[in-house]
Image (cartoon, rainbow, N blue to C red):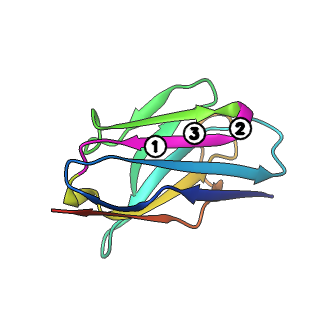
Amino acid sequence: QVQLVESGGGLVQAGGSLRLSCTVSGNIFSINAMGWYRQAPGTQRELVATITSDGTTNYGDSVKGRFTISRDNAKNTVYLQMNNLNPEDTAVYYCWRSPFKMMAPGGSWGQGTQVTVSS
């Protein structure tokens, strides 16, 4: 079993930046695909960004060009650099780890970290 712990959320003004981190601990036997999803009140959880074990990235349309996902495999950590934030980015951001090296259903989730962008 693995545990995912997110950090770095908070309150920021529109146009500002935040960097989220997610560290994985527990029974880690391989470097798996990971990602960030977000959920605003009254909406479904949506894709923000994913990164496979070999570093291939994918982004949701609403964050392309503003957010960057990266990973440090030696630290079992994935990051989400968020620039030019706007109020529509306000949500709880969840870290996710695939059960495999590539994207796949299932996996593990973190507890979430709140990001609030004021106008």
Q: If you read the primary sequence from the N terminus, does the residue marked by circle 2 or circle 3 appear first?
A: 2
The amino acid on which the numbered mark 3 sits, given as a three-letter code, is Met
Secondary structure state at the residue bearing disc 2: helix
Which quadrant is the N terminus positioned in? Answer: bottom right
What percent of the width, then of the height, locates residue 73?
69, 32
Where disc 1 sits, the SS reads: strand
- Earlier sequence position, callout 3 versus callout 1: 1
Tag 3–tag 1 contact (CB < 8 Å): no
CB contact under 8 Å: marks 2 and 1:
no
| Residue located beneath label 1 in the image | 80
Give the extent of the magenta segment: 74-85
Q: Which residue is mark 3?
A: 103
Indicate whether 115 appears above or below 79: below
Q: Name the kind of residue labelled 2 in the image.
A: Lys
Gap between marks 3 and 1 measured at Cα = 18 Å
Tag of residue 75: 2
- 48 lies above or below 46: above
Q: Nearer the viewer, residue 84 or 25?
A: 84
Q: Residues within 10 Å of mark 1 (few under 14, many from 20)?
A: many
Q: Quadrant of the C terminus?
A: bottom left
Tell me what residue is drawn at x 60 percent, y 44 percent. Answer: 104
Q: Residue 4 appears in which quarter of the rendering? A: bottom right
- Residue at image position (28%, 37%) is 66
Q: Is residue 97 left or right of residue 62?
A: right
